[in-house]
Each structure stands twice: as structure tokens, then as C-alpha cells.
Image (cartoon, rainbow, N blue to C red):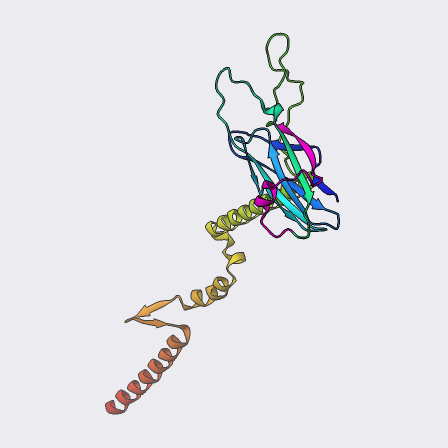
Amino acid sequence: MTLELIPNGDLVFKGPFNAVSITALKLSNSGNERLAYKIKTTAPKRYCVKPNSGFLDAHSTASVQVMLQPQATTTGQQDDRNKHKFMVQWVAVPDSYSDDVDNFWKQDLTKLNVHDSKLKCVFADEAPAAVVPNDSHGNKDIDAPIARADTGDDSSKSRLKQEFDRLKDENESLKEQIKQQDLRHRNPGNDRIDNPVVDRFKPNQQQQKGLILFGIPLTEQLVLVAFVVALIFGFSLGYFLFSCGN
């Protein structure tokens, strides 16, 4: 008949202690008999234990929560937590017993072989904030090591910086290209380079420039045709007048 306690020496409670602090206790029955257990403490008003008693079948385990209740401290009040202890009692349950666990522990147990294990309470307060030591003049020692937050992986930061520089260079290049295009558009002498379509239509526009009579543009072909028509008309008119005179 063996009941194993985990932990088996100290129950550690972690601060802050202005709120409920909870620790766990595991009970393991490694024997072949059914066991009854009961948990007691020297400060029952400061702790809440769930469950504080029960049955444990052979080769089974039970988890127990031990809760330290917060207590407001007053001036002059002594801290008696170093005196807090727990005791776990256990005993084999007879095969003939069929009642509940509360009645089991109320009966006369002198004929039964009751075992117990004691646990001491340990309190782990919050770690104080790191203090930078002062020099002999009361100033902060600048050479003292100061804890700092982890800034991440250096290689990741290097890659991010390279990407940022690349994007910055591309941005500057685009700005320069836009500036050059704007200057070429403002300079008329660059039309021959930047506007081939305009250059292609310029000769036609220059050829179409000429005299305009009655809203009709006079081209070289039209003038030649008109000259020929006038010549024929004049020759015909002269021949007609000559014939009438004779």
C-alpha cells in the first residue's frame, strides 16, 4: 500500500499574493488496494483544498487544487506563512465498506493502519525590478549592464534594410525619369524625337499651306487647270470676234 505525492516535499505558491494563488498536488495509488485519503492544513482559514478527501482506486491518480486566499496585511502584523504546513493521510479501504468518504473518516480508525505525509509551504514572491547601481556620487553607472528587450534576429533586420534601400532607389529613379520627360515636353526642339506622329504630318500641313480664294484653297494643280481653261476660252473668244469682223 503506497500513495505517492507529487510534489512530495514542498508546495510552492507563486505571487503576487493580493490575489488567489493556486498550486497543484497529484496523488498516485501505485498499490493494488483501494485507498481513502484526507488532506489537512495548519491554516484552514487561509487555504481552500478541492477535493480535500476521497477514494483512490488501485493504480489510479487524483489531482488536487490547493488555493491560497489573499489576505490584506496591516502595520505590525507578522507574516506567519513560514509556519504553514499540510498533511496527507491515507489508509486502505476494507472490501466490505460501501459508504461515502466523509463517513469513512468519522469512524474509529484505530484498528486501521493510517499513514501520513507532511508538506511544507514555500512562497515565491515576484522578482523585484532590476536596479541600476549608482556610483560614489549618486549617479547612474553608465557602464553597468542594463537589461533590454530582444530586438529580434539581426539577419531579418538586415534583409528589411536592404529591401527598403532598393525601394528607395527605385523611387528616386522614377522621379528622375518623370522629370526628364517633363523637360522634353516643355522644349519644342524635342518634338522631332518624342513625337514622330507629329513629324510625319508636318510636311502635309506645310504643303497644304497656300492661297485661299473665296474660301477655296488654291493648289498648284488647280491654278494650272484654270490657266489652261482661260487660255482656251480666250482663244475661242478671239476667233469668234475675228470671224464677225470679216
At x 67% / y 32%, what residue is drawn? Answer: 119
On the rendered image, what quadrant is the C terminus found in? bottom left
Residue 77 lies in the magenta-colored region: no
Q: Nearer the viewer, residue 131 or 210?
A: 131
At x 64% / y 48%, what residue is drawn? Answer: 55
Vertical placement of 233 versus 152: above or below?
below
Instruction: Look at the image and tell me whether residue 129 can be seen.
Output: no
Instruction: Look at the image and tell me whether residue 80 can be seen.
Output: yes
Residue 115 lies in the magenta-colored region: yes
Vertical placement of 42 versus 228: above or below?
above
Q: Which residues are magenta?
A: 97-124
Name the spot of residue 191 as percent of width and height, x first: 50, 56
Count up the numbered dots: 0
At x 64% / y 28%, what residue is drawn? Answer: 122
Name the spot of residue 152 as percent of width and height, x first: 65, 38
Relative to 60, 192 lies left or right = left
